[in-house]
Image: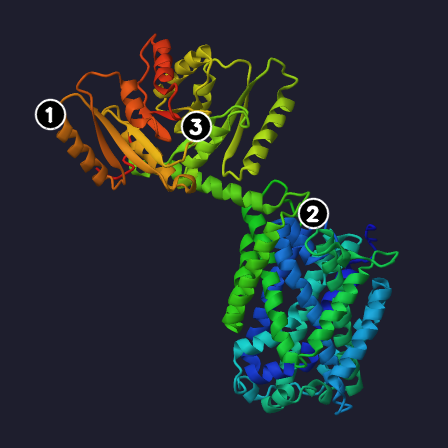
């Protein structure tokens, strides 16, 4: 797609389009009806409220637009580059639809105004004819439309002045108070009026074609909103001084009938409605074009169909189709209410983006036009409150549709080449939570596994990743760590990037909620204990370390030495000796061999029950095995273990294993657990200079056995809340 030509200045590209869309059908045909219902006092409140939301949005747009280059798509472009493509698309699609419907809204207003001269004019036919004409004009190009708008703007001002200069200056007393028609209230009237002030979005519809958008957008929008607000207040006052409320409610052409030169007001009405329709018929296709370029809607919607100036001709035709369908609604008030909901949603999200930028203040956010965060938050709150007051059911439905649209776009995994504020939001939330956890006194009942898995290259020992996945089922935090060694400083960065990418790919491939960590070292001396000691933030640090048990005796002894240091730092240690032939078996039987001492009970049973709760082990049963050496101990330990499991509310079977003849412990395990799918054993603290003995003991107990996990718990845990 060709690059957009930047050809418009502040006046022609922002100020005039904004003002023309605000000085539209509502100004001439519905302001009298509004004041006739609300009275002047409530009318001023209504106008001020509506304009204040637009002002907040205009200021938010101005702030964001002075921070970064603004491309094609106007509001959609700003939101998508601030909050990401998924949120941008969620707002951009209804924004485009609302802009397209607005074309019909203004053309219905134009056709209605003709009835003052031609009472029997068919509204649908006239609106359709003009829509076709405008579609052809837009198809030719925006240059012609912008030039046309300057002349229209002058004619519109003459129409406004023709009414303001009428001889009525004294207020009619009864027009001060509200006189609502049956079925109307302040918020139903607000819903009809609010589209009048949505020009702020039209004003940046051609953002991609502005010569200097960072200057043009804030200057053009703020100037246009200020002029339009003062004009609406003047007209509200003049209407209250011109005719009684009954006339204001019934006569949609009251401004024509009470002007110095009525033909000028007619021309103003026609110019206002037609120019507003033109503004949206060139703005809506550009929003759709931007959506298509970003891959949110099919690329065909961005087609220029031979335009040398990159005119979004496919979008123009689609805008025509939507506007034509909207004309079938016929009623100006019905169309106005629909547009109001769409624009309020857009306003809310736009303000939210600016508020988040102001609050989080990322390093890349340095706008030349800064505003306080609370102004933008007022825009967010005001938009949603007004939506609920207008129609709470429609607000809930609209929000539900947006949520579904957002989820759909998330599933598309849209690719974007820029960062957005969501990263800053997540970092701020993470920082807040980490600080709160750091402030909170640790309670053994709150213990959760934060496991550092030294997996090496994960594809070489996938069983470690798989076991970690089982452990993560009940809110466990898992980090896959790969330590690589090199003596070359030049290769460190490249090597680390390559290995971290492998870990990311492994995590993504297996759909794991894990963190990756790659550490580059010159040698492995005390590396495990050093990393485990320093890994984490505040109190959220690794409390458990998982190793695989290799075949090299030399490495086994080194590991035991490192584990001794880990235990000094109060880290729980898990060693998994995986049976490559049997694997995890049928995942139906977990045997825990606990001697009753050593403090491993909580961690051993926690692991067993976490596995049993996971989908992969849901059919498994747990047995707690206890070896007794005399008949006297049989009933004592049977009762004691049963009571312990009952107090902990654990679903497990107690099995007492008599060993009156003094059999070797390995023989007892073989005799009772050879058919288990996982055996969990305690790990004693290695004594000084007995690393080899400990390593040999681990190998001996787990050799030729089902997959075996050795557990050493070093921190107090009251996981089961048994006092």
- Assess disc 3: are there few (<14), some (14-19) or many (≥20) residues with their C-alpha within 10 Å of its C-alpha: few
Which residue is found at the position 14% from the left and 26% from the top?
633
- Check disc 2: other Cα within 10 Å, few if <14, some if 14-19, many if 20+: some
- Which circle's residue, 2 or 1, is located before the other in the chain? 2
Q: Position of residue 637 (x, y in %)?
A: 17, 29
Question: Which quadrant of the figure contains the C terminus?
Answer: top left
Q: Is residue 603 visible?
A: no
Which residue carries the number 3 mark? 582
Q: Which residue, as the protein is rendered here, is positioned at the far top?
A: 689
Q: What x and y, as percent, mark residue 589?
A: 34, 34
When the figure is inspected, residue 177 is found, relative to residue 443, above or below; the finding is below
Q: SS at mark 3?
A: loop
Residue drawn at (39%, 29%) of the image: 543
Q: Which residue is mark 1?
A: 632
Q: Read off the residue under disc 2.
A: 68
Task: Pick the residue in front: 430 or 180.
Answer: 430
Determine the residue positioned at 72% across, 62% down.
Answer: 203
């Amino acid at each position: 797609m060709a690059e957009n030509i930047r050809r418009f200045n502040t006046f022609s590209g922002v100020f005039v389009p904004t003002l023309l869309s605000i000085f539209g059908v509502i100004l001439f045909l519905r302001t009298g009806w509004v004041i006739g219902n609300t009275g002047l006092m409530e009318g001023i409140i209504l106008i001020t409220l509506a304009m204040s939301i637009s002002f907040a949005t205009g200021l938010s747009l101005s702030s964001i637009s002075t921070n970064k280059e603004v491309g094609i798509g106007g509001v959609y472009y700003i939101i998508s580059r601030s909050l990401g493509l998924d949120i941008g698309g969620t707002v951009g699609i209804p924004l485009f639809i609302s802009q397209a419907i607005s074309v019909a809204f203004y053309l219905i207003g134009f056709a209605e105004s003709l009835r003052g001269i031609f009472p029997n004019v068919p509204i649908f036919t006239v609106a359709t004819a003009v829509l076709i004409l405008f579609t052809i004009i837009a198809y030719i190009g925006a240059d012609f439309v912008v030039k046309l708008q300057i002349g229209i703007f002058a004619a519109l001002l003459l129409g406004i002045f023709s009414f303001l200069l009428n001889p009525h200056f004294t207020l009619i007393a009864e027009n001060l108070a509200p006189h609502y028609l049956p079925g109307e209230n302040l918020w139903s009237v607000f819903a009809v009026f609010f589209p009048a002030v949505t020009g702020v979005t039209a004003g940046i519809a051609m953002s991609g074609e502005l010569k200097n958008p960072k200057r043009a957008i804030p200057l053009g929008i703020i100037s246009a909103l200020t002029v339009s607000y003062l004009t609406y207040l003047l007209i509200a006052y003049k209407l209250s001084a011109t005719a009684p409320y009954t006339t204001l409610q019934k006569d949609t052409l009251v401004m024509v009938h009470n002007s110095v030169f009525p033909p000028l007001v007619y021309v103003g009405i026609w110019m206002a409605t037609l120019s507003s329709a033109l503004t949206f018929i060139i703005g809506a296709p550009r929003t759709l074009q931007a959506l298509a370029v970003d891959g949110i809607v099919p690329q065909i919607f961005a087609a220029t169909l031979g335009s040398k100036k990159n005119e979004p001709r496919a979008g123009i035709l689609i805008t025509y189709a939507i506007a034509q369908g909207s004309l079938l609604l016929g009623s100006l008030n019905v169309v106005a209410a629909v547009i109001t909901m769409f624009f309020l949603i857009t306003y809310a999200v736009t303000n939210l983006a600016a508020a988040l930028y102001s609050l989080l203040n990322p390093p890349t956010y340095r706008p030349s036009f800064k505003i306080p965060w609370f102004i933008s938050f007022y825009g967010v709150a005001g938009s949603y409150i007004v939506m609920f007051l207008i129609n709470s059911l429609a607000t809930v439905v609209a929000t539900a549709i947006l949520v579904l649209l957002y989820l759909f776009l998330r599933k598309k995994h849209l690719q974007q080449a820029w960062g957005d504020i969501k990263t800053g939001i997540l970092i701020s939330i993470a920082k807040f939570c980490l600080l709160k956890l750091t402030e909170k006194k640790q309670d053994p009942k709150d213990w959760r596994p934060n496991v550092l898995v030294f997996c090496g290259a994960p594809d070489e020992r996938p069983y470690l990743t798989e076991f970690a996945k089982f452990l993560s089922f009940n809110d466990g935090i898992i980090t896959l760590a790969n330590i690589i060694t090199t003596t070359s400083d030049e290769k460190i960065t490249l090597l680390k990037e390559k290995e971290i990418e492998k870990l990311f790919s492994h995590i993504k491939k297996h759909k794991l909620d894990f963190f990756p960590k790659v550490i580059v070292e010159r040698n492995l001396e005390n590396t495990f204990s050093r990393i485990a000691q320093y890994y984490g933030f505040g109190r959220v640090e690794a409390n458990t370390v998982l190793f695989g048990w290799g075949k090299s005796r030399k490495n086994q002894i080194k590991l035991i030495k490192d584990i001794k240091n880990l235990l000094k730092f109060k880290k729980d240690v898990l060693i998994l000796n995986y049976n490559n032939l049997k694997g995890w078996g049928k995942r139906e039987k977990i045997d825990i061999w606990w001697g009753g001492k050593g403090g491993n009970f909580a961690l051993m049973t926690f692991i067993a029950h976490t596995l049993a709760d996971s989908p992969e082990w849901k059919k498994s049963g747990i047995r707690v095995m206890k070896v007794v050496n005399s008949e006297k101990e049989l009933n004592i330990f049977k009762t004691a273990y049963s009571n312990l499991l009952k107090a902990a509310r654990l679903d497990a079977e107690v099995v007492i294993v008599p060993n009156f003849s003094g059999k070797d412990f390995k023989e007892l395990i073989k005799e009772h657990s050879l058919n288990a799918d996982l055996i969990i054993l305690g790990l004693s603290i290695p004594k000084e200079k007995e690393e080899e003995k400990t390593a040999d003991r681990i190998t001996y107990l787990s050799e030729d056995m089902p997959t075996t996990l050795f557990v050493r718990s070093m921190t107090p845990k009251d996981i089961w809340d048994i006092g």
